[in-house]
Image (cartoon, rainbow, N blue to C red):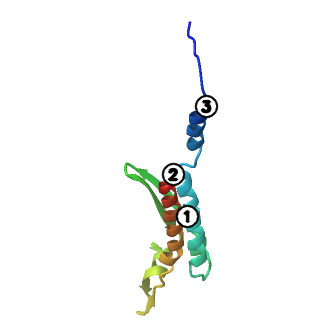
Amino acid sequence: MIRIKHKGNFRNTERFFSQAQKATPREILERYGQAGVTALASATPVDSGATAAAWGYEIAQNPDGYSIFWTNTNINEGVNIAVILQYGHGTGTGGYVEGVDYINPALRQVFEQLADEAWREVTS
């Protein structure tokens, strides 16, 4: 027969389970992935709106941790339109359309929020 005798309280056990219920790294990155999509969509130069509506994200886990990749699926004749809006492109008549840096400023605030949250977690 097995007998268990307990003396004291479950404070440490309750604290352990409380910590275990916190958001996982993937859940946190999902939140920031979506925030990046929203920021990119609102910052994308608009002609038809197709490029702004085509933003998405992927989260990859590797041995070193996690990565977020923002994607844009608006492709025209094999060319990703988000990329040529960012960096510029030549025209069919020999001209050049200068790019607009809209991606970096759009994601800067998302990166800053993510860094702040990570710092709070590390220092708490």
Counting the numbered discs, the total is 3
Give the answer, above or below, for where 10 lies relative to 124.
above
Residue farthest left in this picture: 63
Amino acid of disc 2: Pro
Of marks 3 and 1, which one's residue comes earlier in the chain?
3
Q: Looking at the figure, which quarter contains the N terminus? A: top right
Q: What is the number of the mark on residue 91?
A: none
Q: Quadrant of residue 10?
A: top right
Amino acid of disc 3: Phe
Q: Is 12 positioned to the left or the right of 87 in the image?
A: right
- Mark 3 crowdedness (10 Å alpha carbons): few <14, some 14-19, many ≥20: few
Can you tell which of label 2 and label 1 is closer to the viewer? 2
Residue to which mark 1 is pinned: 56
Q: Do the residues labelled 2 and 3 touch (CB within 8 Å)?
A: no
Q: What is the number of the mark on residue 10?
A: 3
Q: Residue at x 55, y 67 (%)?
A: 36
Give the answer, above or below, for where 10 lies relative to 2.
below
Q: Which of 75 and 57 is in front in this view?
A: 57
